[in-house]
Amino acid sequence: GPATTAPAAVAPASTIPGTAAPADTVVTPAEALRALLAFQAKVRPEQIADAETIDELFQGVSSRRNQALLDIGAEFQAGTLDGAHEKPIAALAAEIAKRAGSWRAPGRYLRTAEDEGLKRVLGRTGLGRKDLQTHLQEAFGLGEGLAEQVVLTFVLETREGESGRGGALGALTAAGTPGSRAEGLQLVAQAAGVVAQRRGFSLAAQVGQAAGTAVDAAVVRELEDRIAGPDG
């Protein structure tokens, strides 16, 4: 393939205090659908192709396919989606986006999946969803939409075990389960670094909030390389 340039490193947060906060962006229905299916199929979101169908993803296992369709209904409250399992996932996401006008992430399914993931990973730290959202706002100036993206990325990337399509399910499991609040927030900062890299902004600590939230550029680069693959 064509030569690719390595993603730019994200500087440690503590070295660039006071940078303007990035513009807020929300999780789109397409991103939410891909995340939901990644949870259900035990694969990474980037391993799901736009052109494949839910039937193909679940290899024709009707019970798993039907559960996924029920959960899509619960998440987006978009009514009956005729033939949803036979549509390319990109086309299904476009239809959901048209019909679920008032939907905001997380819906019913993703909120439950996130809460379970946060409890599993951060249970020993005492940190909950609100703590994470407050920290992401105060330390990095992230708005509500970006904070939700970080929470979703964090939960996806801290899943343990192997993906059904090869490789590890999550890239943030190497450090083990955090045992303290500081360790928990450090892991959240790594997830924030991944979101910043994908969205093309610098993850900058706000003045006076830098301590304990530096982001390891090498870790973020490694995650991005794995997520993007050799051809980006």
Image (cartoon, rainbow, N blue to C red):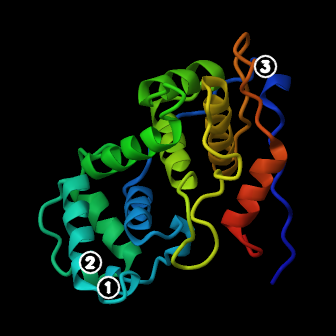
Q: Residues within 10 Å of mark 2 (few under 14, many from 20)?
A: many
Residue 17 image label: 3
The residue that appears at 62% across and 46% down in the rendered structure is 195
Q: Is residue 98 above or below residue 80?
A: above
Q: Position of residue 9 (x, y in %)?
A: 84, 46
The residue that appears at 24% across and 54% down in the rendered structure is 76
User: What residue is disc 2 on?
Assistant: 65
Q: Residues within 10 Å of mark 1 (few under 14, many from 20)?
A: some
Q: Quadrant of residue 205?
A: top right
Q: Amino acid at mark 2?
A: Arg
Q: Is residue 174 above or below residue 191?
A: below
Distance from the alpha carbon under mark 1 to that under mark 2:
6 Å
Q: Are marks 3 and 1 in contact (CB under 8 Å)?
A: no
User: What residue is disc 1 on?
Assistant: 55
For residue 154, side relative to residue 119 (left or right): right
For residue 86, side relative to residue 10 (left or right): left
Q: Quadrant of residue 56?
A: bottom left
